[in-house]
Image (cartoon, helix red, strand yellow):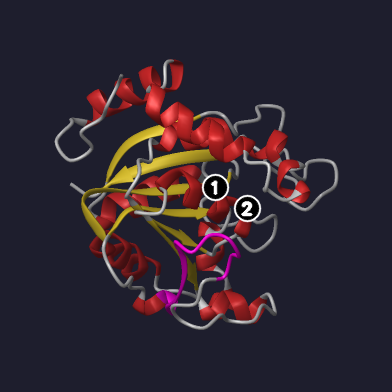
Amino acid sequence: MISINWKRAAPAMVIMAILAANASAAPVATTAVNAAVADPTRPDKDRGQDAARHPAELLAFLGLTAGQTIADVWPGDYWDRLFADVVGPTGKVYAVHLPEADKAEKVAVPAEGSMPIEGHANVVAVVTPANSFALPTKADVIWIRQNYHDLYDPFMGPVNVPAFNKAVYRALKPGGRFVVIDHAAPAGSRLAATDTTHRIDPAVVKADMAAAGFKFVGESNVLRNPADARTAAVFDPAIRGHTDQFVYVFQRP
């Protein structure tokens, strides 16, 4: 079994451990992940997205364990069902709604503390404006998928991104991790594509997190696609669902 002490491990050690864990996942973690992905109660529409989303690989990469708390910012039922199964009934999944995002997407803001996913009582809705981001309790993992770039866009306010990242830092337990998955823009383009092709320069994300006090401790290449030129809009049918995406893990020391 390979375990990672996220709080004490040096970044290089963490990266090596992540790679080793991906190659030979711990039996307990593998069992929980496989059971979550194979759960016969998962909706067919979720299963239909597995090939593009690689849930087994990403869940194994995260190394979640029973009893942990994970916050899904800009949440989606697909991932929250899986998170809930992996952390189990003693764990907690915060489905974190940013009211600004829900308004823009014409999504009803759920009641604070409600349980939005039937059959998953450990998934709890949290409503918090981006500029005053906070969680009911500190989390082991905070995750934002394909929406970090949106924080910079006009429809979000825009957000005070440095303040948001520092609030995320405070919302994590010491040693906790912030996982950012997003569509990659061309290197050096910085923020030019966030409101056009809906991509972001990966270097900007790393710089943002360093400024907030995070340490970069690992990445997964499971969603990378070198055939994507990174110039087309992510909704373009020619590339939708197959964009080049980075998966970065940042740690609160």
Q: Would you say residue 245 is visible in this rendering?
A: no
Q: Confirm or deny contact between disc 1 and disc 2 (CB under 8 A).
A: yes
What SS does tag 1 mark? helix
Disc 1 marks a residue whose amino acid type is: Leu
| Residue under the image location 54 percent in, 47 percent down | 82
Please check the rendered image and state whether residue 240 is part of the magenta-colored stretch, yes or no.
Answer: no
The residue tagged 2 is 78
In percent of width and height, residue 41 lies at 67, 48
> Dividing the picture into quarters, in which one does residue 197 lie?
bottom right
Q: Residue 198 at x, y = what percent?
A: 65, 56
Badge 1: residue crowd in 10 Å (few <14, some 14–19, many ≥20) = many
Residue 123: give x, y in percent of width and height: 48, 63
Return the residue at label 1: 82
- Give the residue at x 49% y 47%: 85
Three-letter code for the amino acid on which mark 2 is drawn: Tyr
Q: Nearer the viewer, residue 174 or 130?
A: 174
Most extreme residue toward the left is: 8
Which quadrant of the rendered structure holds the N terminus?
Answer: top left
Q: Is residue 34 visible?
A: yes
Residue displayed at 32% across by 50% down: 68
- Residue placed most toward the observer, 10 or 136: 136
User: Residue at coordinates 68% horizontally, 42% vertically from top-left?
Assistant: 40
Task: Examine the image and state in which quarter residue 167 appears.
Answer: bottom left
Side of 123 relative to 228 (left or right)? left
Query: From mark 1 to mark 2, how far is it between C-alphas?
Result: 7 Å
Q: Residue furthest right?
A: 237
Secondary structure mostly taken by the magenta-highlighted segment of the chain: loop
- Magenta region: 116-130
User: 85 above or below 101?
Assistant: above
Q: Secondary structure at mark 2?
A: helix
